[in-house]
Image: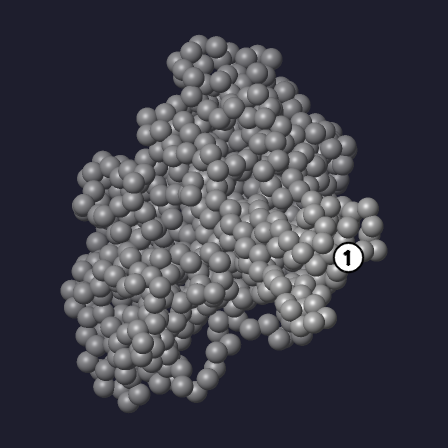
Amino acid sequence: MEIIGKSVIRREALDKVRGRAVYTSDDTSSSVLHAKIVTSTFAHANIIAVDVEKASAVPGVLAVITGEQLPLTGEEIRDRRPLAADKVRYYGEAVALLVADNPHTAAKAAALVHVEYEPLPVVHSPTDAIRKDAPLIHENVDEYEREEGADPITFTNINNYTKIRKGNIEAGWRESEVTVEASVSIPPSDHAAMETRAATAEIMENGEIHITSSSQAPFMIKRLLSTYFDIDVGKIIVNTPFVGGGYGGKASVQQEILAYLAAKAVDGRKVKLEYSREQDLTTAPCHVGLDATIKLGSTKEGCLKAAEIVYLFDSGAYSDKAVHLSRAGAVDCTGPYDIEHIWCDSYSVYTNHPYPAPYRGFAHSEVLFAFERAMNMLAEKLEIDPLEFRLKNAILPGHTTPTQVVLNRSTVGDLPECLRRLKKMIHWDGGKPTRINERTVRVKGISCAWKNSTIPPDSISGAILTFNEDGSINLISGVVEIGTATKTVLAQILAEKLQMDVGNIHVKMTVDTQTTPEHWKTVASRGTLMAGRAVLAAADDAIVQLKNAAACVLRVSKDDLVVANSRVFVREEPERGLDFKEIAYGYQYPNGNAVGGQIIGRGTYIQRNMTHLDKETGAGRPGPEWAVSAQCIEIELDQRDFTYKVVRAVCVLDAGRVLNEKAAWGQVTGAMSMGLAFAGRETFVFDEKGRMMNPQLRTYRPMHYKENPRYLVDFVETPHLEAPYGARGVGEQGLLGVPAALANALSVAAGTALNRLPLTPETIWRAKAKEEASNR
C-alpha cells in the first residue's frame, strides 16, 4: 500500500489556517434578517402569559413567534415544542422568537418580552426523578407519538427502559465469592465547541426551503423538517459548510427548526439565528449526565462471574437523543470483559436540566467510568494487580457480548495486546503510589474501553466520483468535515484503490442535500467505514467504465486491463494503454467518431446484518464491530490541598488499520484532552431552583492548552474485515477510558473512593472528609 497509512495533509488545512474557511455564521450579507430567542428564567414552571406587545412595537421588529400552535418534535419521542407553550421544563428553554432587521434590534426587542410564570418543584437528578413522590415533568409521556423501540413507563419520569439479560444472574451470585458495589454520579456538562450553533433559513418563491446549518446531520434536518411540518422532502435543501467542532452536539436538530419558523414568519425572507455562548451552554442540547450502581461478583482468583447494573441517564427536560443514549449504554454495559451472567436495567429519565445530544463516545465514557471504577474496587478487594485483573477477564474472540453476539477476531480486535503494550509503555508498577516529597505522591491509573456504534440498522452512505478532462477526479460524499480529516482519508482510500496520486483527487468539502449523496449522520466513528465502503463501490463502478472504454479503443478484453497511475493499460504490455484524460470524457478516433462519455462512478453502502434488540433480553446485533483500547493516566497529587497535575496520558487502541498516521494520532490525543477536561473540571453548576450558574467560559472552564500533559499513543492493528483496508473507528476511543483512569489514579493517591465527576480538588476534599467522618 502506497497511500494508506501515510500522513497526508488534510485537504482543508490551508483554508483553515489562512482564514479562508467559511462557516455558517460568516453569512453577513445586508439582506439577511436576524432572529433572537427569548429563554426561560425558570427550570420548571407553568407559563401564565407571554406579553410581546412592547417587543412588537420596536421599530425594525418584523415578527414575534410563540409556541402555542407549533407541533411537537423529537427524534424518538415527540415531546418538545420548538418554543415552550403552557410549561417550561429547563432553565434556558426557548419561549419566544423574534425577527428584526439587525442583531441589535432583535436583542433589544427580546429583552422587552415579558413572560409570567408559576414556579413548579424542580427535579435535580435522575435519582430524584424516579422517587415515588417526584413531580412529573411530562404528565402523559405515554400519549406522545413515538418511534418503535422507545419504551416509556406510564405515570413516571422514565421515557425509555432497556433491559439486558444474559445468563442467569442468580447463578452468577452463587458462583461469586467476592463482591463489590459502586455508586457513581456524573452531572450534565457541555460540548464547548469553538463554533456556537447557527443556522440560516430562506423560503424561495417556488416553495423550496434552503437551510444552512453548522450541523453533523444535514440529511436528518431535511427528514425531520419534512416530518414535523408536512413538507415535501424534496423541497428542503440543507447546506453544511465547515463545522467548527461538534463532538456529537451538532447532531441534534434545534436551531434549524427555529430558523425555519423565523423565515416562515417573514414571508420566506432569509433569517439567521446565531446562538451566543451563553445560549449555546444553556439552551442547546448538552452532554448527558448519569447516576449508576454497579455490583460485581468474582471468584477468589479474580474470574468475573456476575454484573448487576442500573443506569439512570439524565434525559433532561426532553427525550430527544437520551432514548438512544440509554440504549447504547445498555448494549455495552459491562466494558470489554467476558462475564457470563449480566443483569442491566438502563433508563432514560426526565429531569429539569437541558436535554442531551450525543457526546463523543455516545454514552460509553459515562458507562465505562462507572464500570471501571467498580473494576478497580474489586481488584483492590481481591488484592490483585488491576492490570492483570483486566487481562485475566479481557473479552476475546469466541466470547459473547452483553447482547449475546458471538465475537471473532474481526469484530472485537485484540484487547490483551493493548494491555500488554500499555504495561510496557508506562512501566507499570501495579498502580502503587510513589512518594515525590512530603506532600506529593505520583500514581498511575488504568482503564479499558470498548464501543460499538448502535446506529440504525438501515443507515446508509453514498459517494459519487466525477472525472475531469485532465484525468483528475472529484469526490463527493455526504460526510460532514467536522475536524476529523475523514474527507482526506476518503481521498486516500480512493487513491489507494485506483493506485493514483492523491493530489489528483479533489474533495468537495461542503455538503448540500440536493446534490450530495446521503450519509446518515457524521457521528459514531462510522464515517470511514460507511463512506469509505461507498467510495470503494464508486471506484469499482468507475473502473468498470474505464476498462470498458479502454477495451473498445485498444481492442483487447477488459479482463486483460489494469487501472493504475491514472492510466488503463494492458497487463502484459504496460506501455500499451490510455491515460485517464484520454477517456475520462469519452474517446475520439482520428476520423472524428467518438465512444464512451464522462466517467461517473457511484457507490452506496448500507449497514449489514444488524438487528433490533429483543425487548425482554436485549439480545441482538447493534453494530458492526467493537473497538477496544487500554489507557493510563499518571498524576501527581498534593495530599494536603488536593490539587494535582496530570503528568502523562497514554492510550493503546486497536485501530484495525491506521489510514492516516498523524490524523489518527491527532484524533486520539484530542479525545484524551477532551476526556481529561470532562473528567477533571467541566460541569454545569445549578442552584436550588435549577438555574445554571456558570453559563460562560470564564466559569464553565475547559482545559487550557498549557495544562495538557504529555500524550503517548500506540496502535494495535487487527483488521476489521468489513471496513476499508481493515480500519476501525478512532475518533472517540481516546476519550472513553480517560475519566475512569483519572479517577482510579486519584482514588489511590487520595486514599478514598472517588466516584463523582468532575474530579476537582474540592470534590476530592469532600470525598476524603466524608470518609473520615464515617470512620470516626
The residue under label 1 is 577
Estimate how packed mark 1 is, as few (under 14), some (14 to 19) or many (20 or more) residues with alpha carbons within 10 Å.
many
Place of residue 544 in the rendered image (x, y in percent of width and height, measured from the top left):
62, 51
- The answer to which of 249 and 457 lies nearer the viewer is 457
Instruction: Specify the farthest residue to the left.
Output: 48
Placement of 130 over or under 98, stated as above or below: above
Q: Position of residue 220 (x, y in %)?
A: 40, 56
Horizontal placement of 430 versus 334: left or right?
A: right
Nearer to the camera, 518 or 649: 518
- Left or right? Give the position of 479 relative to 435: left
Q: Dot 1: what SS?
A: strand
Residue at (19% x, 74% y) in the render:
51
Task: Give coordinates of residue 60: x percent, y percent.
Answer: 31, 88
Residue at (34, 77) in percent of width and height: 204
Residue 13 seen anywhere in this rendered image of the structure: no
Q: Amino acid at mark 1?
A: Gly
Where 118 sits versus 435, above or below?
Answer: below
Instruction: Please tell me which residue lies in front, 532 or 85.
Output: 532
